Amino acid sequence: MSMPNDDQYIRQPYLTLPGVTGMPNLREVIASMPEEQKHRFESSGEFIKRLAHRVTKWREGLADDEEPAIFALMSTGDAVEVHTLGEDGHSSVVVEGSLNGSPCMFISHQSSFQIVCYTRKIVEEKPRRKIGFYVGGEEIEA
């Protein structure tokens, strides 16, 4: 029995984000920051702003019949479809969305907050759905 080429067994990413060519060394970045800036960098608000920016840039490269979707993954294995994502204090996030078709709210410390982003085809004739991000009283739609 012949074995297929090992290259077939290497997992390829299911999606790639445009413009992502490598990750900076975060330890070096954080070490060079003043303490106040480190505190802000680690905040849930900064996390949400960066995510909103990434989704906005990602959306720009999608076809007219596609839109980004975000799911927050819960420890139970359930996934909450994110409609809005906001900061809840310095280090927690609050998600408003739907779980199995029912509206829900999900709050998590950002260190255990996991999300999956993907694209999906728009099936109905309606405007693209925007995802709301809320930081410091400011709304960012992506």
Image (tube, grey):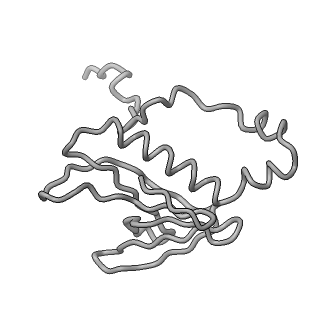
User: In front here: 15 or 43?
Assistant: 43
For the point 28% across and 76% down, the residue is 101
Q: Quadrant of the N terminus?
A: top left
* Residue 28 in view of the camera: yes
Judge left or right: residue 67 versus residue 45.
Answer: left
User: In front here: 10 or 56?
Assistant: 56
* Residue 79 in view of the camera: no
Judge left or right: residue 13 versus residue 49.
Answer: left
Judge left or right: residue 83 versus residue 133.
Answer: left
Q: Where residue 2 appears, x then y in whole percent? A: 27, 20
Q: Residue furthest right?
A: 35
For the point 49% across and 70% down, the residue is 95
For the point 38% across and 22% down, the residue is 6
Query: Total label count?
Result: 0
Q: Is residue 31 above or below residue 112?
A: above
Q: Where residue 113 appears, x then y in whole percent? A: 57, 62
Q: Is residue 11 above or below residue 108?
A: above
Q: Is residue 28 above or below residue 46?
A: above
Q: Residue furthest front?
A: 138
For the point 43% across and 53% down, the residue is 116
Q: Where residue 39 appears, x then y in whole percent? A: 79, 55
Q: Where residue 19 appears, x then y in whole percent? A: 47, 29
User: In front here: 7 or 38?
Assistant: 38
Write down the quadrant of residue 103 in the picture. Answer: bottom left
Judge left or right: residue 142 versus residue 129.
Answer: right
